[in-house]
């Protein structure tokens, strides 16, 4: 693949980190399995998501700072209860086991940024929430 750009700086960017960003910064494999349960006023959900390995050179965009990241699995859960018709309360957690991507090396993160911005599942860790649903029925 050839990309033509106007000057040497942009050409270097396109041939090293830029092409890597286009071709390898997203995992080739991603899968999700979700289970849902409902019994009376109760409902529940459990989800497992797997993100495969990927390669990145962000932030340096240098061919010498290419870093490989391992695949990771995340688990989400939710439990809900319909208190009365038209009113439901749920509590849940995304990434319940607080999984983070592999850390960046010094060349990519400049010893400032701990997590790769190219992570397919982010780098914020666990997220807990409550939700109230009003359906009007």
Image: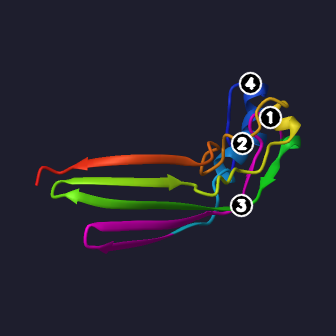
Q: Which mark is residue 7?
A: 4
Identified at 85% across, 41% down, the residue is 105
Q: Residue 116 carries which label?
A: 2
The colour mode here is rainbow
Identified at 72% across, 42% down, the residue is 116
Rendered location of residue 135, percent (x, y): 17, 51
* Sequence-wise first label, 4 or 2: 4
Farthest residue to the left: give it: 137
Identified at 73% across, 29% down, the residue is 10
* Sequence-wise first label, 3 or 1: 3
| Residue contact at pointers 2 and 1, CB within 8 angstroms | yes
Residue linked to disc 3: 53
Rendered location of residue 53, percent (x, y): 71, 60
Residue linked to disc 1: 109
Mark 3 surroundings: few (<14), some (14-19) or many (≥20) residues within 10 A: some
Judging depth in this view, the residue of 96 and 84 nearest the camera is: 84
| Residue contact at pointers 3 and 1, CB within 8 angstroms | no
- 87 in relation to 110, above or below: below
Rendered location of residue 92, percent (x, y): 46, 54
Judging depth in this view, the residue of 40 and 17 nearest the camera is: 40
């Amino acid at each position: 693949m050839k990309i033509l750009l106007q000057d040497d700086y942009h050409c270097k960017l396109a041939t090293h980190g830029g092409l890597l960003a286009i071709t390898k910064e997203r995992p080739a494999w991603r899968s999700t399995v979700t289970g849902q349960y409902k019994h009376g006023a109760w409902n529940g959900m459990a989800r497992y998501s797997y993100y495969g390995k990927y390669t990145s050179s962000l932030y340096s965009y240098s061919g010498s700072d290419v870093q490989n990241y391992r695949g990771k699995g995340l688990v989400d859960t939710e439990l809900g209860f319909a208190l009365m018709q038209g009113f439901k309360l749920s509590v849940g957690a995304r990434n319940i086991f607080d999984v983070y991507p592999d850390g960046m090396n010094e060349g990519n993160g400049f010893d400032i940024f701990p997590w790769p911005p190219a992570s397919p599942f982010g780098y914020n860790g666990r997220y807990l929430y409550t939700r109230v649903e009003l359906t009007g029925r």
